[in-house]
Amino acid sequence: MNYKYTAFLLFLTEVIIGRYIHDTIIRPYIGDLLVAILIYCIVKSLVNTPVFKTAVWVLVFCYLVEVSQYFNLIGLLGWQNSKLAHIILGSHFSWIDMLCYTIGILLVLVVERLTLNLKTKTV
């Protein structure tokens, strides 16, 4: 899998969602699902790490960002007026977001497994 290309396409998709889509399904749920996949692809494009370990650490990272919202990290750091901080860290904790990140990482694991199976069958 070309992680750089996939990360680039996912980033463009996230920008389009953030800029132009203001609905009740794609922006709040699909956007969070895709951001977990985006982070995974960025990490894999930079370092050659095992799939499962990378997926777990990306999921932990996503969870930590979400938990930081629960504790109002942006406010604690004095960044409440920073639009960039709100875009990157978010501002509202949600259990549904945690579920979306989890589903995104599960999709990563399924696609990685399917990709591996296809590679071994063609060799």
Image (spheres, rainbow, N blue to C red):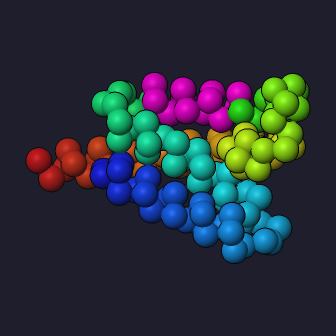
Is residue 102 toward the left or the right of residue 119 in the image? right
Image side of residue 63 versus residue 111, left or right:
right
**For the point 43% across and 57% down, which residue is it?**
8
Percent across and percent down for residue 108 are 48, 45
x, y (%) of residue 52? Answer: 45, 30
Q: Name the spot of residue 115 as percent of width and height, x first.
A: 32, 50
Which residue appears at 73% of the width and 63% of the height?
A: 27
Q: Is residue 55 magenta?
A: yes
Q: Which residue is located at x 73 percent, y 57 percent?
A: 29
Q: Say which quarter of the image contains residue 120.
A: top left
In the image, the segment drawn in magenta is: 53-64
Residue 112 position in % (x across, y down)? 39, 44
Query: Residue 16 magenta-drawn?
Result: no
Q: Is residue 38 above or below residue 15?
A: above
Q: Which residue lies at the image location 30% right of the left edge and 52% below the top edge?
A: 2
Decide if residue 65 is in sight here: yes
Quarter holding residue 58: top right
> Left of 61 or right of it: where is 123?
left
Task: Label the magenta part by its dominant secondary structure.
Answer: helix
Query: Is residue 97 in sight in this rendering?
Result: no
Q: Quadrant of residue 68?
A: top right
